[in-house]
């Protein structure tokens, strides 16, 4: 008997040893592969990957407590939590003028955070609480492999099209450069030198925070930040849905079923970060196939942005053009907007909400006395509630739409949790839920005060939708996930109605497992988000022809994320657990079409990045290479400014329309100019008259022959440098008063080839 046990132990040890060797070889292959693919950029890539790992490891005592019901103790979420907490409190200290926005401040805040986490770990150890992941090393290893591989893939792709040029990249990149130069926040608006940034700059701020913390350069980290977020957008859904399936199938994961949680997690990760929507299936495959059967020749090409500009564009409707983007499109296109960066923190909140719901479901408080101080103290000081409030507050600065959306989602989780744990007593449920909602609002508004007291909202109320999407278009875009949600809800109701004796909301919810309840919330909220723009919209400057665009854009973007999580869990929940054959068949149909949307990535990557199989075509991550490619006449002069000018002196350049090469100087350097992209400043300031007035003043400086007038205007706008290059000559032509301008200062840079030059205005330091 003893010999048999020794033999089994020896075999098990050899198996474990082989597994560790294979894991080591895989890790070496990934690290070596990254060096081969990314070339010189690999050092910045490794720096950010290691930084995320170190921050995550330090945060484990905190996330291990919050995610104590997770097999991995929230390993992937710990990275996001550490970035959110350290980045936010750095911003808070800078905003209330207790610190300067420097690398030293960023490092100091991180060190304080690390010390606090160590103290928490020691406190937990003294109490006999162990919150470190234990016995799930393989899971953490594979999560790290997934994160690293996704990070590497997207970073490699970005190196084929790294230029911060086109769409709104000038704004995103310029925000980052402006904040890199600034020691205060908000930084001076690079397109409105007499004011501060009056927009949701939180997303770009976090990119700059990590840039300063890692002592790297914006030219590379502009691209790295978006690939960093894309990696989290795969790894975090994997971790969450893996845990949800594991919780629901606990005790059933034997034999082949052990592979279900990781497959479900991978499905969620791919659905959220790589897949397209139903438009790709219909217009890439179905319609061309039908036309081919009919003998009709058609253009076989599929342009991937069409999936985001469908309602109002095909067929074209002048009065109602909308936007319905999704993460994969964002990651390919390369804009670093706030809603993109905020995916990282949205997924963090969703993970926290699931962990919180698990804990609430485990508590039975039906006998609790709401008049006791101990109860309210425990409820109000709940780390889940406080952290959710902090994140919701942060959304008001990163992407305000997410604050509204996820306040509702958080409210749904709190309400459902209270219904279950308070025994179905309506008065208690309402009392506790209302108080918790008020605390969430109070915390969220309090922590973000340094932003809101300086911010002028551009929202002009809510309007009733005058136009509506064609039903077939909604079906094309959202038919797949909505079908899954409907099947899931009906199947769940059928199951629970058979199980409970007393048919009531409480009994149904009490009989429902936490993963099912959570998927129900995410699915129903997602359906609501796609319906709202059909009813109402938020009014802004795009009222004429694009009234619903921004509302639909921001709401359906989050609907896509919630749907991805719901499908990742719901499909396998129906296939494996549900006994109803029709539900299984429909789940299989949804899975088939979902897998078909995965082809969107290959199509968009080829269209945007080119032949990524040719490693030799890799250009690198430098976002400023657009200078030599798009504005070669001004490239040397702009690089001179980048290399020689410190601080944020005003550099005058010709203003122009949004989405053009105008403002290439301010965008590439972060140095403020008097007035920039017209539509953007109109949106941010809600004062088109002031924008046009400043543009006219700039015209006078460049064209007037009245020396006194030009000097007065230069003084009024505190102009330090005057840039004369391609767009100035394009805009003002023969009216350009070059002789007068040069007499007002010293030419500090002259490009002999293109006649571009920079004047330092006399009398300005």
Image: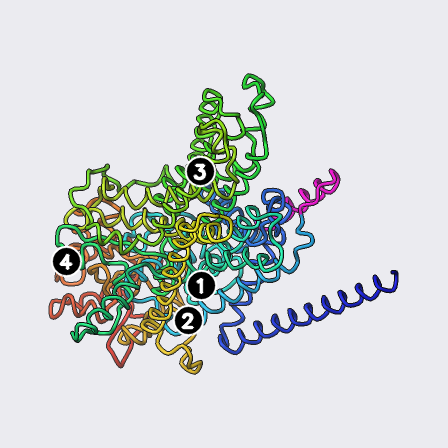
Crowdedness near tag 1: few (<14), some (14–19) or many (≥20) residues, C-alpha within 10 Å: many
Please say if the residues under marks 3 and 1 sit with CB atoms less than 8 Å apart: no
Q: Earlier in the sequence, mark 3 or mark 2?
A: 2
Pick whichever of labels 1 and 4 is earlier in the sequence. Answer: 1
Front of the two marks 1 and 4: 4
Name the residue tied to disc 3: 410
Which residues are the magenta region?
110-131
Q: Is residue 441 left or right of residue 103?
A: left
Q: Of callouts 3 and 4, which one flags the residue occurring earlier in the amino acid sequence?
A: 4
Residue highlighted by disc 4: 316
Vertical position of residue 415 compared to residue 124: above or below: above
Residue at (39, 47) in percent of width and height? 398
Give the mark, 1 or 2, whose residue is nearer the N terminus: 2
Cα gap from disc 1 to disc 4, whole angstroms: 33 Å
How is the rendered protein coloured?
rainbow
Measure how far apart labels 3 and 4 are at the Cα level: 37 Å
Q: Which residue is mark 1?
A: 227
Classified by dominant secondary structure, the portion drawn in magenta counts as helix
Q: Secondary structure at mark 4?
A: loop
Spot the residue most to the right: 2
Front position in the image: 456 or 118 = 118
The residue that mark 2 highlights is 157
Q: Residues within 10 Å of mark 3 (few under 14, many from 20)?
A: many
Q: Is residue 616 above or below residue 3?
A: below
Q: Are the residues at dot 4 and dot 2 in contact (C-beta closer than 8 Å)?
A: no
Residue 338: in magenta span: no
The alpha-carbon separation of the residues under discs 3 and 2 comes to 35 Å
Compare residues 697 and 103 and report the one nearer the observer: 103
């Amino acid at each position: 008997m003893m010999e048999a046990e020794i033999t089994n132990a020896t075999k098990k040890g050899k198996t474990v040893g082989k597994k560790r060797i294979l894991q080591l070889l895989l890790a070496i292959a990934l690290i070596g592969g990254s060096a081969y693919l990314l070339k010189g950029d690999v050092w910045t890539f490794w720096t950010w990957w290691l930084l995320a790992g170190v921050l995550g490891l330090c945060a484990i005592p905190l996330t291990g407590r919050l995610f104590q019901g997770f097999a991995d103790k929230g390993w992937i979420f710990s990275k996001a939590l550490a970035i959110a907490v350290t980045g936010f409190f750095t911003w808070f200290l800078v905003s209330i003028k207790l610190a300067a926005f420097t690398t030293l401040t960023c490092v100091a805040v991180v060190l304080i955070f690390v010390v606090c986490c160590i103290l928490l770990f020691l406190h937990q150890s003294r109490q006999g609480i162990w919150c470190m992941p234990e016995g799930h090393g393989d899971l953490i290893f594979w999560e790290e492999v997934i994160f690293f591989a996704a990070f590497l893939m997207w970073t490699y792709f970005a190196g084929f099209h790294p230029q911060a040029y086109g769409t709104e990249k000038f704004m995103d990149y310029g925000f980052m450069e402006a904040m890199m130069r600034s020691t205060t926040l908000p930084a001076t608006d690079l397109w409105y030198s007499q004011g501060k940034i009056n927009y949701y700059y939180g997303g770009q701020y976090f990119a700059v925070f990590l840039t300063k913390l890692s002592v790297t350069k914006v030219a590379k980290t502009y691209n790295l930040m978006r690939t960093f977020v894309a990696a989290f957008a795969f790894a975090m859904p994997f971790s969450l849905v893996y845990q949800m399936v594991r919780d629901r199938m606990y005790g059933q994961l034997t034999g082949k079923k052990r592979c279900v949680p990781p497959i479900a997690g991978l499905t969620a990760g791919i659905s959220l970060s790589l897949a397209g929507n139903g438009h790709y299936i219909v217009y890439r495959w179905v319609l061309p196939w039908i036309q081919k059967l009919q003998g009709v020749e058609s253009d076989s090409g599929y342009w991937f942005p069409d999936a985001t500009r469908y309602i109002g564009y095909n067929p074209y409707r002048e009065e109602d053009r909308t936007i319905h983007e999704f993460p994969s499109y964002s990651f390919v296109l390369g804009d670093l907007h706030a809603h993109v960066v905020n995916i990282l923190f949205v997924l963090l909140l969703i993970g926290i909400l699931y962990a919180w719901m698990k804990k609430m479901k485990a508590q039975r408080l039906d006998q609790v006395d709401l008049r006791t101080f101990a109860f309210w103290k425990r409820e109000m000081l709940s780390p889940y509630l406080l952290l959710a409030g902090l994140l919701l507050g942060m959304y008001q600065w990163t992407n305000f739409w997410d604050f509204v959306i996820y306040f509702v989602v958080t409210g749904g989780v709190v309400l459902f949790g209270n219904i279950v744990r308070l025994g179905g007593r309506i008065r208690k449920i309402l009392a506790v839920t209302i108080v918790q909602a008020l605390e969430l609002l109070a915390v969220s508004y309090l922590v973000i005060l340094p932003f809101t007291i300086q911010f002028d909202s551009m929202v002009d109320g809510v309007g009733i939708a005058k136009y509506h999407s064609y039903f077939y278009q909604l079906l094309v875009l959202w038919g797949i996930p909505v079908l899954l949600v409907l099947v899931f809800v009906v199947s769940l109701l059928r199951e629970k109605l058979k199980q409970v004796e007393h048919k009531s909301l409480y009994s149904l919810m009490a009989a429902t497992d936490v993963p099912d309840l959570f998927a129900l919330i995410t699915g129903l909220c997602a359906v609501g988000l796609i319906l709202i723009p059909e009813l109402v919209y938020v009014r802004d400057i795009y009222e004429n022809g694009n009234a619903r665009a921004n509302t639909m854009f921001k709401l359906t973007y989050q609907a896509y994320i919630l749907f991805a999580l719901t499908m990742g869990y719901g499909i396998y929940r129906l296939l494996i657990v549900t006994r109803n054959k029709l539900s299984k068949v429909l789940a299989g149909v949804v899975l088939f079409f979902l897998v078909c949307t995965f082809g969107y990535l290959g199509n968009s990557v080829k269209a945007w990045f080119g032949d990524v199989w040719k490693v030799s075509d890799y250009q690198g991550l430098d976002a400023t290479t657009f200078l030599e490619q798009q504005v070669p006449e001004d490239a040397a002069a702009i690089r001179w400014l980048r290399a020689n000018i410190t601080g944020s002196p005003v550099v005058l350049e010709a203003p122009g329309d949004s989405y053009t090469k105008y403002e290439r100087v301010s965008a590439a350097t972060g140095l403020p100019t008097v007035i920039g992209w017209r539509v953007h400043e109109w949106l941010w300031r809600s004062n088109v008259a002031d924008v046009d007035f400043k543009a006219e003043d700039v015209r006078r400086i460049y064209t007037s022959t009245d020396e006194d007038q030009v000097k007065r205007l230069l003084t009024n706008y505190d102009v330090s440098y005057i840039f004369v290059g391609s767009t100035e000559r394009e805009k003002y032509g023969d009216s350009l008063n070059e002789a007068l301008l040069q007499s007002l200062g010293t030419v500090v840079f002259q490009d002999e080839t293109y006649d571009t030059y920079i004047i330092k205005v006399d009398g300005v330091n």
